[in-house]
Amino acid sequence: MEIIKELATWRAAVDILLITAGLFFLYRTLLRLGTWAIFTGILLATAVFFVANFLDLKGIEWIYSNLSHVALIALIVIFQPELRKIFERAASVTRQEIQKNEEGLAAMVAHSLFKLAEQKRGAIVVFPGRESVGEWLSGGFRLDARPSPPLLMSIFDPNSPGHDGALIVFKGMFTRFGVRLPVSESRRLAEDYGTRHHAAMGLAERTDALALVVSEERGKLSIFSDGQIRPGKTPDAVEEAIVAHWTKTSESAMEMPGKGRWWAAMVQLLPSFIVAVLFWMSITVSQGEVLEKSFNVPVEYTLTSPDLVLVGDKPNEVRLHLAGPRINLDGLSPSQFSVKIDLSNAVPGKQSFLITEANLRLPRKIRLLDVTPPNVELTLAEIVKRELAIKPQLVGRLPDNMAISTLTVKPDKLNALLPSMQGKGQVSNLTTTPIYLENIRETTTLFCKIIAPPAIQPLDRRWPDVEVVVEVKSKN
């Protein structure tokens, strides 16, 4: 019931709609791209993760939680070509209508190539798609000319310097000719196909370009696109292939199908919506699972009264036993909070302070189950002012023939603040920093700092330095 309530909220609806849009966009892009390797791998890894999460398989969960970042980097490296194609195609969000002059260009190219086929003169004509083909092309000559049948026929004349290369047709212009294309590394083509066919297949495997090849041995025309080859039997069929290529590569990956194809769009959209709902529900269930966790956290004491001081031992940390949803508890760190003991209303003497949720600032949906120890025992004492004697801290011995005649400390007493219980029935002294006697050969004056227990504080902000005069005499 809890998940149904969360599913009915507007945040869940927006979340699911955004996930659905992302899945639909990915599907449409991969459908045009013609490769499912990356999508299949992601789906398989996600399915394994959900099954492991549902069955509470700690080993798989540990592997996913610790290796997910490394796997993501490896995925990007392995599928870099596919991901690049996805982003290149996704970058185009506008649709360009095919102009009449381009339809005429398609008809002109188709009929000219069939004339070359009748004469058994080889040719390659390339129509780039949405992806850039520049990195796969080499050599050739710049042309930038208006298309015409005589120009196309002359380019592939056996006496032309660039007749063995490819002609690039881009934005209604003949832009380059005599261009070399990358040779296919796959085995999709039979060995009896010539260099032109293998070069056209190489470009069709790497990009979304359309390549038309005329074989001088067979006198036939072949169409290459999306890593596939098919025959161009008639000029009309070739013209339709060119126009279809322009239509496919000019529309956005997210563009909805045209009239009469809404049912096909729903068939694509409905699975994306179902997967988005299941994904959202699985994440909600897994992250909403209530877990328990223990933390060691520091204890802070707030003492506002200037007349009281903590004496004796006091706990510096306690162990908290907490419970809450996985999504809230997994990201929790002991450094995020501490136990605060308020001593503003405390009185002198030994007292016990119970630790509850009031002493904590717990994150949302996190509750306190137990504390170890459940309470802290503290002793507070009033601060009194006393005059304490200063005792020099002598270390070592004088040389054998020397002895101390007098030892003078200036001042010999200092006012200090200390707990009242430490001042009653006890002799409290302040000491100086060490004075090493083995280094003294004559009467020496030293300036030393004061060393005092933590509970004894100076009347001012800091202890003053004291002067120690060590007078020595000879034993002889």
Image: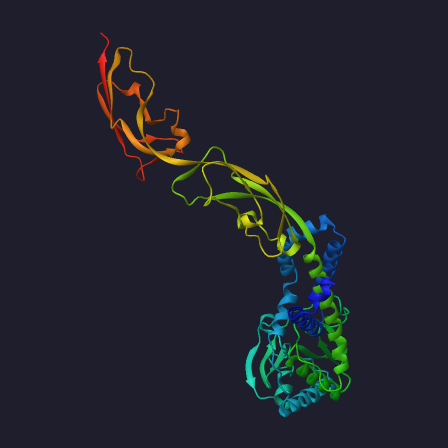
Measured as percent of width and height from the top left, residue 250 is found at 64, 81
Measured as percent of width and height from the top left, residue 455 is found at 40, 34
Residue closest to the eye, 132 or 26: 26
The C terminus lies in quadrant: top left
Measured as percent of width and height from the top left, residue 60 is found at 72, 51
Residue 113 horizontal side relative to residue 73, left or right: right
Residue 236 horizontal side relative to residue 359, left or right: right
In percent of the image, x 72 and y 63: which residue is there? 3
Measured as percent of width and height from the top left, residue 61 is found at 70, 51
Asked if residue 287 shows in the view, the reply is yes
Residue 317 horizontal side relative to residue 430, left or right: right
The N terminus lies in quadrant: bottom right
Residue 69 higher or lower than 182, as above or below: above
Residue closest to the eye, 146 or 243: 243
Residue 220 higher or lower than 189, as above or below: below
- The answer to which quarter of the image holds residue 148 is bottom right
- The answer to which quarter of the image holds residue 247 is bottom right
In percent of the image, x 30 and y 26: which residue is there? 390
Residue 37 higher or lower than 430, as above or below: below
- The answer to which quarter of the image holds residue 68 is bottom right
Asked if residue 125 shows in the view, the reply is no
Residue 242 higher or lower than 453, as above or below: below
